[in-house]
Image (cartoon, rainbow, N blue to C red):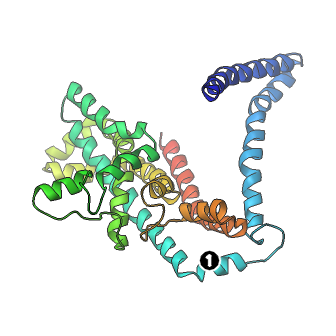
Amino acid sequence: MSDILFAILAAIVGPAVTFLFYILLNFIVNRFPEKAQRVLRPYVFIGPVLVLVGGLLVGPTIQTMVFAFMNEDSSEFVGFKNFVKLFGDSQFILTVRNNFEWIAVVPLVTVVLGIFIATLTDKLGPVRERVFKSIIFMPMAISFVAASSIWRLTYSWNPGHTQIGMLNAIVEAFGGKAIPWIQNEDFTINNLLLMVIVVWANAGFAMTLLSAAIKAVPEETVEAAAIDGANAFQSFFQVVVPQIWGTAVSVFITVLISTMKIFDVIWGMTGGNFHTNVLGVDFFREYFVYQNTGRAAAVVMILMIAIIPIMIYQVRTYRKQEELR
């Protein structure tokens, strides 16, 4: 009960204190001459945010980069020793390979499925479109941990007992034998089954953005293509897709970055066992289980280096879209 009261108090007092804080800052700025006000006001309002970002994001990032070159308790500088050990470990190579599989499959399938669903639901009419889109978007409202709990029951395998998992119940209903869907050593199947969860959770996000982009495509361009003799297939891929390409790329990159950092689903479903380990889980184990700060920081550094080029490309893509507008 105390935790609930504390959460409610934080939700009420936090915004109120922030609001009063900015009123106070604005009051102080108003005491200056008008010319000084125009110069100071933007910095006064954005200043606290920059301080928070610097203290809670930039500072820890620099600290992590330093720890990556130190020993397990951060008491001695060891150079690239942590990285050498990581890439000399066959299990870590498998972990990196798993991450590559995730980023090769999940973003592409999510975008394609989002376009497919958006196109189909747009043809249903206003009422049915809203209903179906709401249903498809619902998984976005739950966390990956909750999604893992749902799909853990779906993939459940209880050898020697009554099967409570939906898939195995269907298999046994048709006279088959229960299958260990994710509790096996075939890591390709394991990873694909776990990817289904993330695609299922992100499909609504992709559908929403891509549906808006498709609706924004001028009807005149589609009609002109039809007049020129293009069929529905050609019209969609040669007229509609090029015009929603910017949105599709943005969705792809957003899902890609999220996938590279994936942790919740793996930890909730397999704990990284059965050859399903990824960098996010590897970091968690090194830091919280083995308490090896140096190696954990090295894992994070590898993940950061992989994400930075993608983020730069995403920023450039957004800027190009803004220029076109």
Q: Residue at x 41, y 69 (%)?
A: 274
Q: Secondary structure at mark 1?
A: helix
Name the residue at the bottom extreme: 88
Q: Quadrant of the N terminus?
A: top right
Q: Amino acid at mark 1?
A: Leu
Name the residue at the left extreme: 174
Does residue 217 appear anywhere in the picture? no
Q: Residue at x 46, y 58 (%)?
A: 266
State the image coordinates of residue 31 (x, y, percent, origin top left). Answer: 89, 16
Please give left or right for residue 62 compared with residue 124 in the image.
right
Name the residue at the right extreme: 32
Does residue 42 appear anywhere in the picture? yes
Please give left or right for residue 106 compared with residue 292 in the image.
left
Q: Is residue 23 above or below residue 130?
A: above
Name the image quarter holding residue 270: bottom left
Residue placed most toward the observer, 312 or 164 = 164
Name the image quarter holding residue 64: bottom right
The residue labelled by disc 1 is 86
Within 10 angstroms of label 1, few (less than 14), some, or many (20 or more) residues? Answer: some
State the image coordinates of residue 245 (x, y, percent, origin top left). Answer: 37, 51
Please give left or right for residue 2 compared with residue 216 in the image.
right
Q: Is residue 288 above or below residue 225?
A: below
Across the whole image, how many numbered discs are drawn on residues? 1
State the image coordinates of residue 147 (x, y, percent, origin top left). Answer: 39, 46
Q: Residue at x 60, y 83 (%)?
A: 88
Q: Residue at x 22, y 57 (%)?
A: 168
State the image coordinates of residue 201 (x, y, percent, origin top left). Answer: 38, 46
Residue placed most toward the observer, 145 or 171 = 171
